[in-house]
Structures are given as C-alpha cells and as structure tokens.
Amino acid sequence: MEPAIVTRGLRKVYRVFRKEPGLTGAIRGLFHRRYDEAVAVDGVNLEIGHGELVGFLGPNGAGKTTTLKMLSGLLHPSGGTARVLGHVPWEREVVFRRQISLLLGQKNQLLWDLPARESFQLNRAIYGIDQGVAQRTIDHLSALLEVRGLLDKPVRELSLGERMKMELIAALLHKPKILFLDEPTLGLDVVSQHRVRDFLRHLVAEEKITTILTSHYLQDIEALCRRVVIIDHGRIIHDGSWEQIVRNFSDRKEIVLRFKETAPDLRGEEWGELVSRDGATLRLRVTPSRATEISRRAIDLPGLEDIRIEAMPVEEVIRRVFAASTSR
C-alpha cells in the first residue's frame, strides 16, 4: 500500500522584491524591479504511513508551515512531487479536500461574532454532512474537549484555549483522514495545552488519523510523537524517533528560579551553568543527575518564590541536531 503522504524533492522558492534605499531607489524600482530568491523548502523527501503521528520541528522560518501548505494544496511547489492519499495536493480535487484538514494555530476559521455552533453548521453544509451525523460528531468532540456548555457563546468571548478547542472541532467535523496541525497549542496555558494533548492522543489512537504536528513546545512532542522530522533552512536534517534525539542531544535540564525581588547572581560549578538572569528570574542549566541536588540547595535561598525543572528548549535541541549535521 502506498504511504499516506509521499514527497520527492519538494521545493518552494519565493521571489522577493529588492528595494534600493532612498528616493532614487524607490523611483528606479517603479520601472526596473529587481528580485532575490528566498528558498523556503529545499528538496524535502518524506514518507508517512497511514495512521502515523509525526512531529515536524524546526526554528522559525525553517519551512514547516510552507511544507504543510503545499501538502494541503494551498501552495504550488517550485519543484518536486507530492502525493497525499494518492492525490496531487495542489490539483485541489474535491475528493482530496474532503479527506484532509489544516489547522493553523495563528489563524481563525470560526466566525468571530457568532457562536461556534453556527460555524459548525456552515462547515456541515459545505461538506454536505448529514445533520444527524454532524450533531453526533459535535456532541462527541465537545464532550471530549469539555466545551459542551460553550457552543452557543460568541467566539470573541471565548478564551484562547476555548477557541482552539472549537477550532479542533471545526477541523474534524468532516472526519478527515489527514490532519495537518500547525502550532495548535501556541499561547495556551498549561491546563489547556494538557487537555489538547490528551484529546489528540485519544483521537489518533481511536480514529487512526494520519497527523503532522508542528510545535515549539517540547511537551507536545514528548507526549504525542514517536517519530520526529526536523527541518532547517528548508532541508530535513533528522528523521527518526524522539527518544533518539533526547538521548543524543538533550543531555541537560534547566532550573528556573523566581524570587520576590532581584535574583541573586549564582555562579560557580556548584550551581551549574548560568543561562540567564533577568530581574527576579534566574535560569540554570545542569546535568539531569544534578537537577535534584541543586534544586534542594536552591530551596534554602532567601526570597525564593517558585522553582521548576524544565527540559531543554526545543530550539536548543534543534540547534544541537543542526550543529551535528553540519559538522559531518
């Protein structure tokens, strides 16, 4: 059986107008425009199986969203090929569009001044879904996401986390086989992030939806993705298990200390590496074996209000993966 998603040499290049400085340059640009090429995606090769959930990571501008937009048919590539469920995405066949869904965490698809339920009814009509089937789907998803009591509340009055849950329902109403999620937990509080992760874990396990998830939150990837693809400057630099990445590149923990007043200047081997000191907040980087020891010592510091231990930021892990790939 052909994989759910296959790409070969997928590439996207944008032409960017180069404006020369000053009034003379602006006038010259009216008659003789010069362009530079910006390579967003540079030869991506991917194979993703049916029902697989893949984390798609990379720094800002790495090409993640551009890749998802090509795979969903919103953008035409500059080169290469792709097939999603056996279809060429940018041909935008009706049968293809009925089987995919793209959710952009920074874009709203719900009507701002209307209750989410009315947006769901619009989606139901667009996809030609039976009224009874749509209602059962809405009831089921809203119960899982704990938003049943909010369906008739105007979207503009919902919190960010509540809106994202409604966006998920809208994206899943037509029961797609492919789900592209671009930063679905961006800006959400810890509780909302946890609820969305639980929902996605249940969804993929029960419905076997092929999913590509981009996120800057390490917890999203750790909780949901067994396989991770890392992209940088439009090129894939790692495709494998998340456990392998953590084992090879994430060998530090970060201890974040928050004080009532200005944070003390903790330096020296006994405190590990000082990452940052900003007002009342201090961030230390230590080996996992020393995290508990240093945290216990920090508890006795005067004026300490809060302490937490975090894994290394995704950006730092990606930087290490990238550094390793360029040194080969």
Image (spheres, rainbow, N blue to C red):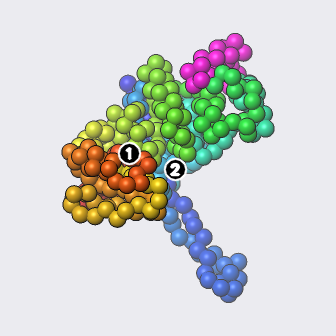
Specify the segment rendered in magenta: 127-146
Q: Amino acid at mark 2?
A: Thr
Side (left or right) of 268 relative to 276: left
Q: Nearer the viewer, residue 152 or 175?
A: 152
Side (left or right) of 20 relative to 267: right
Choose top left, top right, bottom left or bottom right for residue 259: bottom left
Q: Of helix, strand and loop, which one carries label 1?
A: strand
Q: Nearer the viewer, residue 91 or 253?
A: 253
- Residue 63 appears anywhere in the view: yes
List x then y, in percent, for residue 25.
65, 84
Residue at 41% in and 60% down: 263
Disc with the residue nearer the chain's start (1 vs 2): 2
**Magenta includes 286?**
no
Q: Is residue 292 above or below residue 280?
A: above
Q: Is residue 284 above or below residue 111?
A: below
Q: Amino acid at mark 1?
A: Arg
Q: Of helix, strand and loop, which one carries label 2?
A: helix
